[in-house]
Amino acid sequence: MSVPAPIPESAPTATAAAGLNESWRGRYASAVMNTFGTPTRVLVRGAGAHVWDADGNEYVDLLAGIAVNCLGHAHPAIIAAVTEQLRTLGHISNLFTSPAQIRLAETLDALVFPGAPQASRVFLANSGTEANEAAFKIARRHGGATRPRILALENAFHGRTMGALALTHKRAYREPFEPLPGGVEFLPAGDVDALRAALGSDVAALFVEPIQGEAGVQPLPSGYLEAARELTAAAGALLIIDEVQTGMGRTGAWMAHHLLAPGVVPDVVTLAKGLGGGMPIGATVATGEAAQLLGPGQHGTTFGGNPVAAAAALAVINTINKEELLKRVTELGDRWAAQLADVPGVTEVRGVGLLRGVGLTDTVGPAAEVAAELEQRGFIVNPPRPDTLRLAPPFVLADADADAFTGVLTDILTRRAAA
Ligand SMILES: *Cc1c(COP(=O)(O)O)cnc(C)c1O
């Protein structure tokens, strides 16, 4: 069989009037599976908190690849770490290990469970959904034959592979793929009585996000995680906290639960998104008994713990420390949220640090339309809900860019309310 030569990179057979962006979009539609719809912009370059599309338009990236590019685009520390690691040793599979993998595991043990790093263990994967798959398997191992039930919360998002999807609440995501792994039940988020009623000696685990990101940046009510810890411990069930979106400094603390529920020590924490600063990596970090439940042959991955991805994650952690970015996240996040809360047409600003949901009044119309106008004016955000814009910018976002966004949002919402 003959394979066609790849299309040369100078390519777009430009109907120049429509622009390179449109020409690439046409090619996307005829080459890529339609799982997202065709994205509006074809991005070609990024630097710091800014990106450029194929027609040379510049945008302030207030979404950071959905809470991923915590150091912005093309950060020199990530480039240096990845380049050096790839030059030295790129990939080895999990038949071998590498200093980068071991250092990262040690670092995450201490970062996630500062009280008892020696009791914790890490499984490295490539994404958030995979981190949750490993956690799901830990829950099943803990449950055995006597604890078949697993609890998750309404509006939860834990990923798109079959196990993580079973933990994800949205019906439209789940239904086309049933039957999913069984035993999962959904409880109203934040309802302690419902949790107490549901827990028993037949429950293996409870999965929670400290702030439900995909649900529109919806924090759990204060006290819920504390109650969840107490009740799961009493029932002998694991508490599994999904910090895929909220972890790695996004809230101004390394882990959102460190900030929002300081006394709570979960059994398992899952990470991804910000962990690699743009390199694909996920981690399942467990402590105590839960750290020992996956034995030889019970789980695996060819790419997980890849030295290049591990080197990127170590560079992210070192840079956040060196540049004192946790403090930056808190300061900018607080100031910006207060500013945004005063914008006419904004009902409330939810979330913490640089993970924010900006609630909109009905009078300004659907959030998707507001997001599209913002994109036209050079700001990337997304509408996780019809009444909410999500902001999850790089930690290195400049004050001037944050202020400029507030100005443009004010302008757009004022006009839309008057229309
Ligand atoms: C994004 C996300 C996931 C899934 O991560 P992927 O890397 O897209 O698989 C899981 N849990 C939460 C809370 C997320 O925000």
Image: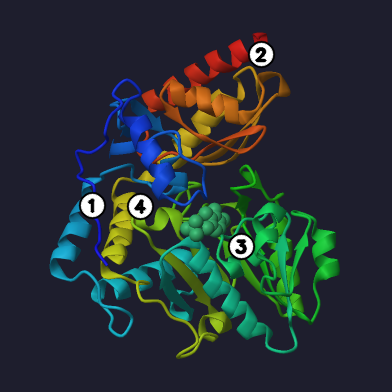
Q: Nearer the viewer, residue 401 or 235?
A: 401
- The residue where tag 4 is placed is 277
Three-letter code for the amino acid on which mark 3 is drawn: Gly
Residue 264 location, x and y as percent?
Answer: 62, 64
Which of label 2 and label 4 is nearer to you?
2
Which of label 2 and label 1 is nearer to you?
1
Crowd band around label 3 with a 10 angstrom C-alpha radius: few (<14), some (14–19), many (20+): few
Residue 140 location, x and y as percent?
Answer: 64, 81
Q: Nearer the viewer, residue 232 or 362?
A: 362
Mark 2 residue's CB less than 8 Å from ligand 1? no
SS for dot 1: loop
Three-letter code for the amino acid on which mark 4 is drawn: Gly
Query: Residue sitting at 43 percent across and 80 percent down?
Result: 300
Which of label 3 and label 1 is nearer to you?
1
- The residue where tag 1 is placed is 6
Please tell me which of labels 1 and 4 falls first in the chain.
1
Q: Quadrant of residue 208?
A: bottom right
Relative to 77, say whether 388 is above or below: above
Please tell me which of labels 3 and 2 falls first in the chain.
3
Q: Quadrant of residue 141?
A: bottom right
